[in-house]
Amino acid sequence: MNTTISDRLKTLGIELPPAGPPAAAYVMAATTGNTVFLSGHIAKKDGKPWTGKLGKDMDTETGKTAARLIAIDLIATLQNHLGSLDKVKRIVKVMGLVNSTDSYTEQHLVINGCSELLFEVFGEAGKHARSAFGVAQIPLGACVEIELIAEI
């Protein structure tokens, strides 16, 4: 019996939130051919931007938790855009931006919070190429922002 993505989410105890609207002049998802590009999603806590700077007022584990929550929001946007997560053939690429100090060097560990959840939810199809960058600031002071590219 094939397990659906919805089944995996239930097994993981994850209930997808409603997909969020864009915060400026863009769309949350755009498809060209068999590729879906998701706009950057910022970390949220209690429905508001989760602010902070890694290496100053946030540690790596907290950042990793924020990245995991972003993965859930990214999956919700995919679901909203596609109608069914079972249309996803694979997660191709993830790009993570980490609001961090000049001396902070664990951006890759923060973004693991997203990558690890994508592996759990999509299995082999969740294994992706990735970049993780430290940046001076993210819109609204958010601690982490992540964008995603998927094949359908």
Image: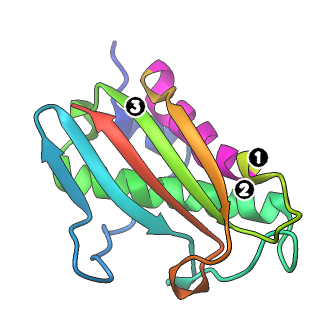
Is residue 76 shown above or below 119? below
Residue 92: which numbered mark, if any?
3
**Residue toward you, 70 or 135:** 135
Residue 81 rendering spot, x and y as whole percentages:
19, 54
Instruction: Give the labeled residue for mark 1.
Output: 109
What is the magenta range? 110-124
In percent of the image, x 44 and y 30: which residue is there?
Answer: 122
Amino acid type of the residue tagged 1 in the rendering: Leu
Q: CA distance from mark 1 to mark 3?
A: 19 Å
Amino acid type of the residue tagged 3 in the rendering: Val
Does the CB distance between marks 1 and 2 fall below 8 Å? yes
Confirm whether residue 108 shows in the render. yes
Confirm whether residue 16 shows in the render. no
In percent of the image, x 63 and y 48: which residue is there?
Answer: 132
Q: Earlier in the sequence, mark 1 or mark 2?
A: 2
Residue that lies at the very extreme toward the top in this rendered image? 1
Residue 151 rendering spot, x and y as whole percentages:
27, 31
Provide the secondary structure element on which disc 3 rests. Answer: strand
> Which SS type dominates the magenta stretch?
helix
In percent of the image, x 59 and y 48: which residue is there?
Answer: 114
Q: CA distance from mark 3 to mark 2?
A: 20 Å
